[in-house]
Image (cartoon, grey):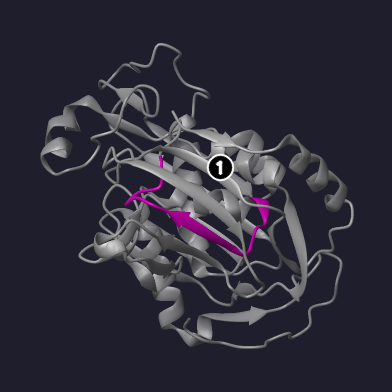
Amino acid sequence: MGQSKLSGQAAQDDQRSGTRMKPGKQTTLRKRAILSGAGVHSYAPVRLVLHPSEANSGISFLRTGLPGGRERLIDAIWSNVSMTELCTVIGDPADASVSTVEHLLAAFAALGVDNVMVEIDGPEVPIMDGSAADFVEAIQLAGIHQLSVPRRYLKVLKPVRVEQGRAFSELRPADKGFRLEVEIDFAAGTIGRQKKSIDLDGKLFERDIARARTFGFLRDVERLWKAGFALGASLENTVALDEERVLNPEGLRWPDEFVRHKTLDAVGDLALAGSPIIGTYRSFCGGHKMNVAVLSALFADKSAYEFIEVQPRRDAPRVDLRIAAQAAYAPERS
């Protein structure tokens, strides 16, 4: 299991700066954070360095350790997604890519961190304990620094929906905030049908979502290994299921840990919008593929969204703040 190596002083700095935070301003990290671990699919050891970044730079990954000493900067944006089987991959797998980005991106999005450059010397973000908890801790210890530039929000203006068989994912308008309503339905009795609805908030995410672990079935292990997946999966980073049993000695962290993890994945995948979303996300039996597909469908319709610089308050009058309208390890099977 990986460890974050950070100073406790950063946490104190974060608490002091948090009292001066103004809503609607962009943020970055107060200081860099370092984590290390191994990928759940590649089993490759990797070192992450989370660097503070300038306003409007967004979240990006600096992929180092490439053949010939090359480096490649990859923006964490939906249009750079190249694969969504069992995890989300950005960049070109034939050249430079980073896989399993969703848990780290979820931590950034939920804690309101807008600008970070993630230096990574391997092909996959480390799985840590299978959740986003270590990433949340690393961000909190590093501290969050507010910048002077306004944050840009992505406001959903009309419903956009994608379907695949009985599964669907959709984005719908909302007056304020970002709500997720995620439902799954597995034949296995250990999971069954579960639903989780949350209004995304940093404290709620840390308490109810961040520690939910990725999961998988033993029946799939041999097939996944042959395909090059799950080479680093273990009971330390994955909830393992044998149809009607959870095999991890410690059991589940919540009875509905499975849908909580699917919600975590959705937060991370939808962070690839590039801006915090004002809207409601609903999915049934979805996963990485459909999370990214609904973003693609949204940006394909310029009348379905706008960018604004101020998130409306519940008690505030609605004002047209349009500034632009431009295209900019949980199993998938449910």
Q: Amino acid at mark 1?
A: Phe
Which span is picked out in magenta? Answer: 111-126
Closer to the camera in the image, 47 or 137: 47
Residue 241 drawn at (x, y percent) = 30, 23
The residue depicted at 54 percent of the width and 33 percent of the height is: 211
Closer to the camera in the image, 212 or 103: 103
The residue depicted at 25 percent of the width and 37 percent of the height is: 230
Q: Tell me the crowding category of disc 1: few under 14, some 14 to 19, or many 20 or more residues within 10 angstroms, Cα based.
A: many
- Left or right: 261 as drawn, with respect to 218: right
Q: Is residue 38 above or below residue 92?
A: above
> To which quarter of the image does residue 74 belong?
bottom left
Closer to the camera in the image, 5 or 245: 5
The residue depicted at 17 percent of the width and 27 percent of the height is: 219
The residue depicted at 65 percent of the width and 66 percent of the height is: 174
Residue lying farthest to the front in this orientation = 68
Q: Secondary structure at mark 1?
A: helix
Residue 69 drawn at (x, y percent) = 31, 62
Residue lying farthest to the top in this orientation = 249
> Is 121 contained in the magenta span?
yes
Residue 215 drawn at (x, y percent) = 36, 32
